[in-house]
Image (cartoon, grey):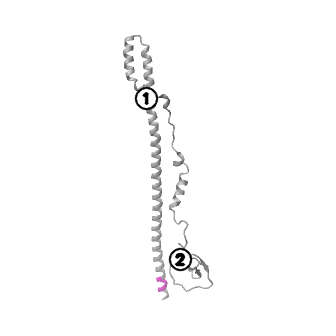
Amino acid sequence: KHITELQLKQEGKISYIQDKTQSLEQNITTEFARLHQFLQDKEQQLIQQLKEEANGILEKMKKSLTEIQKMADAIQRQIDIHSTLRQEDPLHFLSSLKNETERNKDSQEVNTDAVTLISDDLTLGVYKGPLQCKVWKEMLSILNPGVSRLSLDPNTAHSKLIFSEDLTSIRRGDKWKQLPDIPERFDKKECVLGS
């Protein structure tokens, strides 16, 4: 009879450990999935922010480059006019001057003072600096447990422990209480699990 009881208890503990292992494994998988999703979302957000910032800077630089090219073309046309003035044939000069004047109508509108070199740069601190630390601080918002109320589990308590009514505190008693023998219960050390 004693061997049969030991066998049943051992089988019960084996079954309990197998079930608990499966439950904890599922919990680990779920928690890491949440962390992975948070990190992937944050990565995509930062990449999108970087692209938007880069596009804004590049747009200003391309606009500036277009203005610089217009100014260079206008200056080249003025150089061409001056070289035409040096020509010896007055008739050829007058016909060339008329053609140059028609071509340079747009160049008269270019304001060389308005063209500047755009030297904006990306905000490196946001994308390079202490990126891991910054993301870690943001990740704290999804981590559990945060500050929360602790509730002790009487099913895991050693038989010498006495609970408060709200199951939030314990004290050590002098006598052993007669409690059901369940696999979760601490029986060697005076401990209890909480959640």
| Viewer can see residue 6 | yes
Q: Earlier in the sequence, mark 1 or mark 2?
A: 1
| Cα separation between marks 1 and 2 | 79 Å
Q: Nearest the camera: 53 or 173?
A: 53
Secondary structure beneath dot 2 equals loop
Secondary structure beneath dot 1 equals helix
Q: Mark 1–mark 2 contact, CB under 8 Å?
A: no
Disc 1 residue type (three-letter): Lys
Q: Nearest the camera: 195 or 98?
A: 98
Residue at image position (46%, 52%) is: 45
The single residue placed furthest to the right in the displayed view is 174
Up the image or down, 72 lies above or below 147; here it is: above
Disc 2 residue type (three-letter): Asp
* Magenta region includes residue 168: no
| Viewer can see residue 73 | no
Q: Which residue is mark 2?
A: 153
Question: Magenta residues, as a range?
Answer: 4-8
Mark linked to residue 70:
1
- Residue 195, horizontal then vertical, whole percent: 53, 72
Up the image or down, 132 lies above or below 25; here it is: above
- Residue 52, horizontal then vertical, whole percent: 45, 45
- Mark 1, residues whose alpha carbon is within 10 Å: few (<14), some, or many (≥20)? some
- Mark 2, residues whose alpha carbon is within 10 Å: few (<14), some, or many (≥20)? some
Up the image or down, 16 lies above or below 80; here it is: below
Q: Nearest the camera: 53 or 15?
A: 53
Q: Nearest the camera: 195 or 53?
A: 53
Residue at image position (37%, 13%) is: 92
- Residue 111, horizontal then vertical, whole percent: 47, 28
- Residue 109, horizontal then vertical, whole percent: 43, 27
The single residue placed furthest to the bottom in the displayed view is 1
